[in-house]
Amino acid sequence: MRRFEDRVAFITGAAHGIGRATAQRLAREGASVVVSDIEADAADKVASALAGDGSRALALCCDVARPDQVEAAIAAAVDRFGRLDVLVNNVGVATDTAFEDLGEEEWQRQVDPTLGGAVRCIQAALPHLLAAPGGGAVVSVGSINALAAFGNEAYSAAKAGLVSLTQNLAMRYARRGVRFNLVAPGTVRTRIWERRLAKDPSVLERMTSLYPLGRIGEPEDIAAAIAFLASSDAAWVTGTVLRVDGGVLAGHTGFLREVFE
Ligand SMILES: NC(=O)c1ccc[n+]([C@@H]2O[C@H](COP(=O)([O-])OP(=O)(O)OC[C@H]3O[C@@H](n4cnc5c(N)ncnc54)[C@H](O)[C@@H]3O)[C@@H](O)[C@H]2O)c1
């Protein structure tokens, strides 16, 4: 499939995990990809590997919590590739701080990049997405944490905010050719689990048993869904929340064995 031939995609947090897998997927399907991340060296590595495969890729250092950096990165992307068709808002910041200890600063540290970062990127990208010849597409990476209670209140509230943002902007721009959708992943094997694994080496194995499809997700599972929503295959899809969660939210996992096995 080469659904992104001649298209340009800007991905935030693209140096690792789900963002990197998305950059690889869109590049494989013909996109010119902007690998933006707060970690410049890691972004460079991802972009160089894509370019080595014959894709057009640009690494940009961009902290989505910094309005000046977001503006500059979107401008640099358009300057380099001449257009912007797809924005993937992938950055999300979660910490393990208990709710009682969640001070003002810690709240901002999670909510600002996760929700504010998406707003900033959308505002900077919008004029270019509105001008995209085949229509523009924004895909935000949410979480099942926005749809049910899994703890991590600041992060989860920010992800829930992304759902509302997606639905409202989908309506606001529906007649102007920009679609807004959100992917809500369940547990995905990325480095964000490293901290938990260091304390609790069997955490992901235990998680596996909670997933009806019998495994946790891989970054490529989420990238495939993002690619669908960003592509013209989803031309009649806007304002949607696509759960990519191994089935976990479809049932009460505590009852899974009791009832279905
Ligand atoms: N891994 C999971 O289990 C899981 C589950 C649900 C949702 N998600 C969401 O998926 C998205 C990607 O997470 P991941 O698991 O791939 O994590 P990851 O740590 O592998 O990748 C996140 C990337 O974002 C970058 N980043 C962090 N802060 C940034 C900032 N302020 N500006 C720019 N870049 C920044 C990091 O450098 C990193 O490259 C996040 O929004 C996360 O909330 C992950």
Image: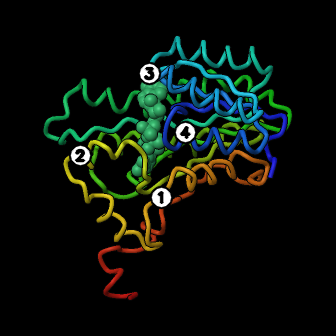
Q: Quadrant of residue 36?
A: top right
236, above or below 260, in the image: above
Q: Which mark is residue 217?
A: 1
Question: Foreground: 253 or 23?
Answer: 23
Pointer 1 or 3: first along the chain = 3
Q: Amino acid at mark 4?
A: Gly
Q: Quadrant of residue 211?
A: bottom left
Furthest-front residue in this view: 52
The residue that mark 2 highlights is 198
The residue that mark 3 highlights is 65
- Residue in the picture at 61% in, 38% down: 169
Cβ of mark 1 under 8 Å from ligand 1: the answer is yes
Q: Count residues near mark 3 (Cα–Cα under 10 Å), then give few for <14, some for 14-19, many for 20+.
A: many
Q: Quadrant of residue 93?
A: top left
Q: Is residue 167 left or right of residue 104?
A: right
Image x and y of residue 246, in percent: 48, 66
Cβ of mark 4 under 8 Å from ligand 1: the answer is yes
Question: Foreground: 113 or 23?
Answer: 23
Pointer 4 or 3: first along the chain = 4
Label 4 to label 2, Cα distance in Å? 23 Å
Q: Which mark is residue 247?
A: none
Q: Amino acid at mark 3?
A: Ala
